[in-house]
């Protein structure tokens, strides 16, 4: 049984294997972008989130699910209740069984999760040449340096291959993807999506916006977390100061 | 718990309870007037901090358990539901997740304190051993807890660690089957891990109570390592140390809060936000940071232990016990000792060389007879590295406790601490990572693993035999006063 030998496998055989990998697929360091959400007081940019959601809907959602995000969560993007109802109603979900025991289709409600493009993982694989398009709900948390990584991946496609590299059918070369050979075709290019708010329509901007949106999707409570943290730490600092005074006062009579 | 006559309380309700169950008297004796050395430094805060962390982990853990589902198909989703849909769930989970790390930070500093100031020495050996048991239970609990979210690192970390037990001769396979609840890591593994993760913290509470009980029998050690001789040497625990511990805990929580609110995932691994998939192995399987030094020791043993090495090490052990540890040899004379030393080291080195150079033509077929395989050797080294802590009070039987009065011990203790950090770094890197020339990460881990064992088995016994140490002050009070005078002058 192969699992049983995993430890010895790690110790002994990883050595030659990973050096081969390193030779073939080293990725350069991921460039850092300026994000409104970084830093202790960072917040999400609602306009960027809306643009990112548009990209997700129009491009990513044709292959990638996002099943941990619900329509009602879109409130954080600045949509009101009616807008969210309208967005949800554009999708239909299977519900049931009803009183007759039949499944039926109905319009999605704000309480429903984003509708997945494929009924199951195998269908997703079959439609994508055997490669599974992962769920995007947690993508920026599931990759090291996630927000920058998504931006780098979106902008990292190269038409010109390094010398001696050959791609098989359905493979693309991406500078930042582990092993460089990725099954996802370049999803974004300049002017491929039209923005209504006058933002420039470049690949770089698209990459920033989709990454912004995915960062929010993975970490929806980030703003609340940082706000709470500020209050908690401020309180603790004052409390610590008071307690230090108490301690000094109590100890003052013994030295 | 003592039979001393009970003092009456003024409050009638308190007195009514106390005369039937003297719980208020006990609290007063153990936490009110309990005589505590007056010269604690800030290192002595970490016991209270560890206690605070234990309570925090249990409180948040119980809430998480209300929302968690121990099923391989639902576990990951249930954790994400806690993060997204449970009110304040993200906060509770981040407190718990980072709490594990901060519990270990507190406990590691607590252990370092115990070693540096010789808190393990008589009459506190049992107190110390109970502490090592708590540490082991914490490691088990933390490891099992990391499996529960059922992410990629959960599954593959569990695979690597549970597989270690298969290295135990004869019973290994059965133990692994028992841990797994089947023939692979699957739903039965997750459900039993959840049950154990809920149980073990309460076992820890039990051992912590014994640990505190033992502490209150012998009293605390202190930075000078001297026993209090008179009332002048001690202070009542309350209000002096309650106020100091309270302040220390708040400062600790500030650091803890910075992680919870501003970098909650910094100490975790991104792969654990990918749902577990038995068909995809992550490129680097890394345990949580607090296991890294032990992981490095585990991976450092890449060679089999053949019978030459075992025989050589056995002879050296006899030499150490007879000539160093016992101070005066009981069974052997000097000539035999010399013979043991030469023969032992010769055999051990020869065995290692024979193992590394499989092509040797010398008729040393016995070198191929390795009762301890590399894998089992690694497991033994890893558990042995913690086992050494159990026998530490007997490895170091120097009469002086505190490193303040043992300059040589102090230097080696600091080098030891640094080497544990280096082992931690080695544990976080790929085994074949090359630093320069032929020198790779495995060799780095081997050198410092060697030092780790040498520190306990050779350096400490030698020091306790030969180190003279500085002159001790007459009493705690005298040392404190002369220090205060110096500072005043």
Image: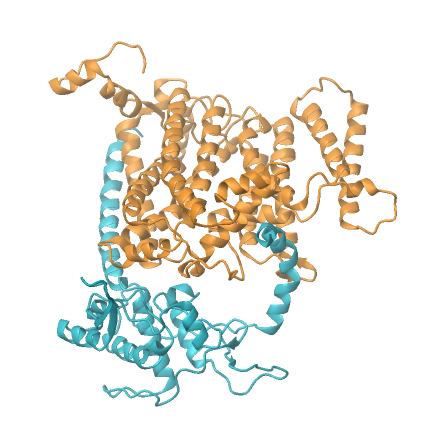
For chain B, the rendered hue is orange
The part of the image, by quadrant, that contains residue B323 is top right
Q: Which chain is cyan?
A: A
The part of the image, by quadrant, that contains residue B55 is top left
Q: Residue at coordinates 51% horizontally, 28% vertically from top-left?
A: B401
Q: Compared with residue B241, is residue A77 higher up or lower down, i.e. above or below? A: below
Q: Compared with residue B223, is residue B450 higher up or lower down, i.e. above or below? A: below
Q: Return the x and y of residue A238 as percentages of the image width and height.
A: 22, 48
Q: Return the x and y of residue B487 as percentages of the image width and height.
A: 38, 36
Q: Residue at coordinates 47% horizontally, 27% vertically from top-left?
A: B225
The part of the image, by quadrant, that contains residue B436 is bottom right
Of residues B271 and A3, the one drawn nearer to the viewer in this rendering? A3
Q: Return the x and y of residue B21 as percentages of the image width and height.
A: 23, 17
Of residues B289 and B320, the one drawn nearer to the viewer in this rendering? B289
Q: Residue furthest left?
A: B12
Q: Quadrant of the N terminus of chain B?
A: top left
């Amino acid at each position: 049984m192969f699992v049983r030998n995993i430890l010895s496998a790690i110790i002994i055989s990883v050595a030659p294997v990973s050096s081969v990998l390193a030779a073939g697929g080293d990725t350069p360091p991921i460039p850092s972008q300026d994000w409104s959400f970084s830093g202790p007081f960072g917040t999400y940019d609602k306009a960027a989130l809306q643009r990112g959601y548009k990209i997700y809907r129009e491009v990513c959602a044709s292959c990638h699910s996002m099943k941990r995000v619900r329509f009602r969560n879109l409130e954080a993007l600045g949509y009101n209740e009616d807008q969210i109802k309208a967005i949800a109603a554009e999708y239909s979900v299977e519900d049931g069984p009803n009183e007759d025991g039949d499944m039926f289709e109905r319009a999605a409600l704000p309480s429903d999760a984003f509708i997945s493009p494929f009924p199951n993982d195998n269908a997703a694989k079959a439609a994508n040449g055997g490669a599974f398009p992962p769920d995007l709900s947690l993508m920026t948390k599931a990759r090291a340096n996630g927000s920058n990584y998504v931006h780098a991946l979106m902008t990292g496609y190269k038409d010109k291959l390094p010398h001696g590299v050959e791609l098989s059918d359905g493979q693309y070369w991406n500078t930042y993807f582990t092993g460089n050979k990725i099954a996802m075709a370049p999803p974004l290019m300049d002017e491929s999506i039209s923005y209504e708010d006058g933002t420039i329509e470049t690949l770089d901007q698209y990459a920033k916006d989709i990454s912004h949106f995915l960062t929010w999707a993975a970490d929806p409570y980030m703003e609340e977390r940082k706000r709470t943290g500020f209050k908690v730490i401020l309180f603790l600092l004052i409390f610590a100061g008071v307690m230090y005074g108490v301690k000094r006062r109590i100890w003052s009579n013994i030295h | 718990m003592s039979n001393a006559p009970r003092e009456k309380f003024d409050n009638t309700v308190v007195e009514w309870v106390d005369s039937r169950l003297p719980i208020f008297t006990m609290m007063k004796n153990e936490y009110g007037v309990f005589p505590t050395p007056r010269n604690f430094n800030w290192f002595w805060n970490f016991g209270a901090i560890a206690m605070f962390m234990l309570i925090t982990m249990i409180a948040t853990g119980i809430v998480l358990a209300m929302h968690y589902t121990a099923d391989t198909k639902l576990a990951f989703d249930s954790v994400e539901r806690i993060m997204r849909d449970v009110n304040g769930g993200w906060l509770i989970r981040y407190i718990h997740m980072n709490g594990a790390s901060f519990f270990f930070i507190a406990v590691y500093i607590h252990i370092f304190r115990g070693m540096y100031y010789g808190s393990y020495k008589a009459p506190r050996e049992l107190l110390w051993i109970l502490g090592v048991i708590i540490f082991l239970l914490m490691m088990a609990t933390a490891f099992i807890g990391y499996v529960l979210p059922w992410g990629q690192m959960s599954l593959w970390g569990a695979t690597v660690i549970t597989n270690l037990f298969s290295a135990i001769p004869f019973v290994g396979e059965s133990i692994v089957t028992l841990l797994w609840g089947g023939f692979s890591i699957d739903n039965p593994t997750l459900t039993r891990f959840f049950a154990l993760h809920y149980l073990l913290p309460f076992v820890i509470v039990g051992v912590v109570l014994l640990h505190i009980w033992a502490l209150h029998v012998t009293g605390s050690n202190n930075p000078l390592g001297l026993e209090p001789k008179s009332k002048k040497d001690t202070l009542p625990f309350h209000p002096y140390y309650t106020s100091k511990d309270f302040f220390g805990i708040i400062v600790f929580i500030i650091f803890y809060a910075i992680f919870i609110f501003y970098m909650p995932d910094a100490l975790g691994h991104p792969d654990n936000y990918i749902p577990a998939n038995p068909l995809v192995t992550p490129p680097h399987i890394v345990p949580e940071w607090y296991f890294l030094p032990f992981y490095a020791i585990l991976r450092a043993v890449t060679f089999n232990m053949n019978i030459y090495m075992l025989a050589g090490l056995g002879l050296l052990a006899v030499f150490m016990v007879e000539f160093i540890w016992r101070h005066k040899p009981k069974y052997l004379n000097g000539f035999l000792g010399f013979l043991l030393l030469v023969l032992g080291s010769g055999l051990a080195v020869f065995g290692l060389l024979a193992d590394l150079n499989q092509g040797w033509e010398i008729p040393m077929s016995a070198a191929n007879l390795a009762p301890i395989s590399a894998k089992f050797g690694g497991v033994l080294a890893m558990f042995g590295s913690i086992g050494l802590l159990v026998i530490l009070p007997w490895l170091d039987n120097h009469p002086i406790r505190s490193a303040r009065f043992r300059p040589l011990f102090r230097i080696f203790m600091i080098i030891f601490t640094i080497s544990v950090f280096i082992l931690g770094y080695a544990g976080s890197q790929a085994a074949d990572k090359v630093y320069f020339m032929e020198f790779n990460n495995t060799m780095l881990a081997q050198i410092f693993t060697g030092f780790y064992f040498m520190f306990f088995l050779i350096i400490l016994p030698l020091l306790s035999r030969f180190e003279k140490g500085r002159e001790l002050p007459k009493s705690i009070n005298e040392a404190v006063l002369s220090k205060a005078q110096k500072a005043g002058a």
